[in-house]
Image (cartoon, grey):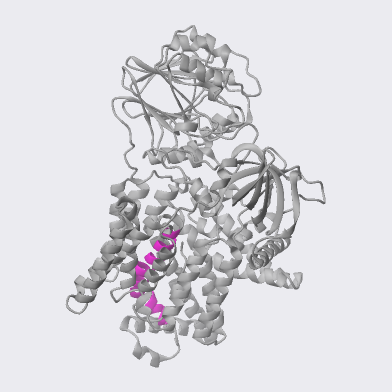
Amino acid sequence: MLMSQRSDLAVVPAGKAASGGHQPLLWAVLAYSAGIVAGPYLWRPPMWWLTALLVFFPSVLYLRKRRGLAARTLILAALAVVGALSVQVRRTNLSGAGLLSFADGREIQLTGYVTREGSLRPGSFGGVRETVDVESEQIVAAGRPVDVAGGVRLSLYGKEPDPGTSMRLFQYGERLRIAAKLRAPRNFRNPGSFDYRGYLSADGIAVLGSAKAERVQRLAGFQGSRIELWRTRIHRSIIDKIHQLWPPSEAALVDAMVIGDAAFIDRPTRTDFQRSGTYHILVVSGMNVGILAFVTFWVLRRFRMDDAVASIATVVLCVAYAFLTDVGAPVWRAALMLFVYLGVRLLYRERSMLNAIGGAALGLLMLDPTELFGASFQLTFLSVLIIAAIGLPVLERTSQPFSRGLHNLDCPGYDLSLPPRVVQFRLDLRLIAERLEKFMGPRIAAGMVSGGARITLGAFALMFISGLMQVGLALPMAYYFHRATVMGLPANMVVVPLTEVLMPAAIVAVLFGYFSAALAKIPVVIAGVALEVIAGTVNWLGRFRVADERVPTPVLALVLVSAGVLALAMILAKRNWALCSAGLALLVAAGIWIARVPPRPQWQPGVMEVTGIDVGQGDSTLVIAPFGKTVLIDAGGPIGSSHSEFDVGEDVVSSYLWSRGISRLDAVAVTHGHSDHIGGMPAILNNFRPRELWVGLMPASRELTDLLDQARRLGIEIVQRGAGDGYDFGGVSVQILSPPREVDLDTKAHNNDSLVMRFGFGRSAFLLEGDAERKVELQVAKLNPRADLLKVAHNGSATSTTPELLQALQPRVAFISVGAGNTFGHPRMEVLKRLAALHIATYRTDLQGAVTFYLDGRSVIPRAIPRY
C-alpha cells in the first residue's frame, strides 16, 4: 500500500512535485469511474449512449475556443458516458460454462493440462494435498466423451510420503488424465460474504474438483506457452533455492515477501501481520515494486549512471520482477505506475504527478472496467494518490527543504540559493560539527552530523507517510477487512526500513546461491537478521489487545463523509498552511471516527429476530431480543477431524455480523462440542468480545477446553446452563430443556449433549436443539414446549425431528442449516416428508441462504435475505 513512498521521496527533485496544474487526466479517470459505477443502474440500449457521444463531441469542438469551462464539462460527461457504456457492453466471462453440467459430484474422467502449479500442503483429513489449476480438454462421463474447455481447480490428495520420497509436483504444461469429482463453487449466501465465485472466475476457474493422487495419469505431450513454462521453472527454482538457504520458518516468509508464494504461511502468521497493520509486507504488492525501484535507481545513480539509462534499467528490472512473481494485477499496476512516473521525470514534468497517476488508472480501467470494484485496485490507486496529493505537498513544506539543504553542507556558497530557514539549519549543523571535530576529526564529525540529520529527516518522513496512510486508508480497511490498524504506525516505522534491507539482501543471496553457497552466506545472514526483527516486531505488537480492534461495515453516510473529507484534504494540502492543517485534522478525525465509533446495529425493535446464518454443513444462529440484546448460538466450523486455513467464524459468521453493524455481542452459546458447531467460535470470541459464554455439558474434549481457556483469558463470563434453568434475556424468556445437569461426562462430545433452548416472546416461541437425537427429543416432547419456529436438529438427519417432538411443538415454520451437496445426504427425505405432511413451511440455508424470522408475539414472519 505504501507503493512508491520511499522511491518518490528519494527521486523527486526540487519543486512542488505533487501540485500545480489542473490535472486533466485525474479528472478524466474520476469521470470515467463515475460512469462505470452508474452504468449498471442506468441501463440504456447501446445506441442511446452512442447517440449521446455523437452530441457531446461536436459540442466540445464548438465550445473549445469559446467557453473553455463548458467544453471541459462536456468532455468529462462524455467520458462518464463511455464508462457507463464500457461496463454495460462488457460480456460476462462464460469460459468453462460447459463444465458446470458435470459438477454434480459424480466421478468423471478429466483430460487436460496444468496451467498453474501448486505446493504440497497437509491434507484436510491427514496425508498431503496439492492444488493445481487445469485447463480441461475432454471429459468422459458415463462412458461418453465430451470435448469441453474451461478452468478446473483440483485438489489432489495423497498419503504421507515415505522418507526420501515425495508426492510428485505436477508441472505447468503437463497433460493429465484424472479420475475426479467436480463441484460448482458456491458462495456463502449471507450479506457481507466474500464473492468466492467471482474470485475464481477472475482466475479463469469455472469448477472445483478433487481426486486421489494415485489416480492421476501423465499423458505424452506439452500444452501451453513456452514462455510461461520457463517462467514457472525459474519461479520454482528460486523457491527451491530459498528453502536451501534459509531454515523452514524463515524460508516461508522470504517466499511470501520476495517471490510472492505464500503457500507455506500459516493463518496465525497472516493474522499477526494483519493485526499490526503490516500485511502489505507479507504479500508481494506495489510496495515491493517501489522498494526494488528505489534501491535499483539509487545504486545506479551512485555509480554515476545517466538518469535516463537508470530509469530504463529500473523499469526493465521491475517489469521482469512482476513477470517472475506472477502475483497478478497489483504488481503489474505498480509496474505501470512506476513506468509512468519515471517517464514523467524524464520529461521534466514533475508537476504532473497526479496527472500521471490518473493516466495510468484510466488506461487500466479502459482495459477492464470491473477493476474499479476490486479492493486491490482501490487500495493501490488510493495509496499512491494519498502520497502524491497530500504526503508530498506536506513534506515539501516541512522536511524536504531541509533534506535538500544537506547537499554540499561544507560549501557556504551554496547557502545563497536556499531559503533563510534552511541556511540557518545548515549553520547550526556546521556549528555542531565544529564542536565534534575536537573529539573525532573533521571527516568523521561532518559525516556523523549530516548522517544523523538525514536519518532524523527520513524518520520524520516515514512516520508522517505511515500515519497518513493509516488514516487515509481507514475507510477501505474498515469496509473490506473490518480492521482498525491501530498499531500500523509504530509497526511500519520498524518494518518498512527493514524490508528495504531484506528485499535486496534476499535477492542478492539467491543470485549468489546459484554460484557459491559461501558467497551467499553474508546476504543470507543480513536478510535473516532483518526477517527476525520484522517477525519479532509483528508478533509483539500483534499481541496487544488494541491491535485486534475489529470494526463493522461503515454505513453509507459515513462512507460518503469520509470520502469527502479525504478529497477535501487533498485539495487543502496545496493551500496555505492553516487550511492544510485543517484538512489533515479532519482526515485524522474521520479515521478515529471509523475506528472508535461503531455504527448503530441493524435490528427491528419490538420483535424477536432469529436468523439462520449460512455456514455450510454446520450451525450458526443469531437471536436478537426486542430491546436489542444479541446472542449467537454456535459458529459453524469444519467437519470432524478435518482442518483447513479457512475459518468459518472469521470468514463467514463475523462478516455477516459486521454487515449488520454489530461490533459486540451480549452472549454466545455453544450447544455442544462438535467441530461444526464450535469450530468458528474462537474467532467470534476474539472479534466480538461477548459478555457471557453459555455452555451445557462440558466433556473434557480438547476443542471445548481450549475455548473455555480462551474465554477466561478474554474476561468472558462462562455460564453453565442445564435443564430447568429459566431467565430473561432482553425481553425474551429463555428456558433450558436439556441436557440435565446430573450426567456422567465422557471424554468426548456427543450429539445428545446439546443445549435445547426455547426462546419465548409473547405467545410466540422458537426452539433450538443443536444436534439432539431421538432420545433427547422424546424427553423434551414430554414437556409439551409449544414453539412456532423450529431449528431442525442435526442438519436434517434422520436421527432427529421425531414425530413425537413435532406433535408436541406444533411449529408453523422450520429451518434447516445444511451444506449444499453434502456427503451425508442431509436433509434426509423422510425428515422433509414429515415436515411437509404437517404443513410446516421449511427453509434451508443450502437453497435460500441466510433466512431471518421475526416473532412479534403472535406469529412468525419469514424473510429471505437477498442472495450474495
Q: In the picture, residue 752 is in which quadrant?
A: top right
Residue at 33% over, 14% down? 763
Instruction: Give x and y (percent) for residue 173.
Output: 68, 59
Work out which quarter of the rendered image holds the C terminus and state it.
Answer: top left
In the image, residue 16 sits, relative to residue 768, either above or below, namely below
Visible residue check, residue 132: no
Left or right: 278, with 224 as reference point:
left
In the image, residue 815 sits, relative to residue 496, either above or below, namely above
Q: In the picture, residue 183 is in which quadrant?
A: top right
Instruction: Give x and y (percent) for residue 539.
Output: 56, 51
Left or right: 350, with 154 as reference point:
left
Q: What residue occupies the far front of the structure in this picture? A: 144
Q: Nearer the viewer, residue 308 or 118?
A: 118
Q: What residue occupies the far left of the structure in this picture? A: 66
Confirm whether the magenta stretch covers residue 655.
no
Residue at 61% over, 61% down? 531
Q: Is the magenta stretch mostly helix, strand or loop?
A: helix
Instruction: Give x and y (percent) for residue 195.
Output: 47, 46
Visible residue check, residue 410: yes
Q: What residue occupies the far top of the structure in this picture? A: 782
Q: Nearer the viewer, residue 204 or 156?
A: 204
Confirm whether the magenta stretch covers residue 384.
yes
Q: Which of 116 and 380 is in front in this view?
A: 116
**Part of the protein shown in magenta:** 377-406
In the image, residue 6 sits, relative to residue 539, either above or below, namely below
In the image, residue 830 sits, relative to residue 61, either above or below, namely above
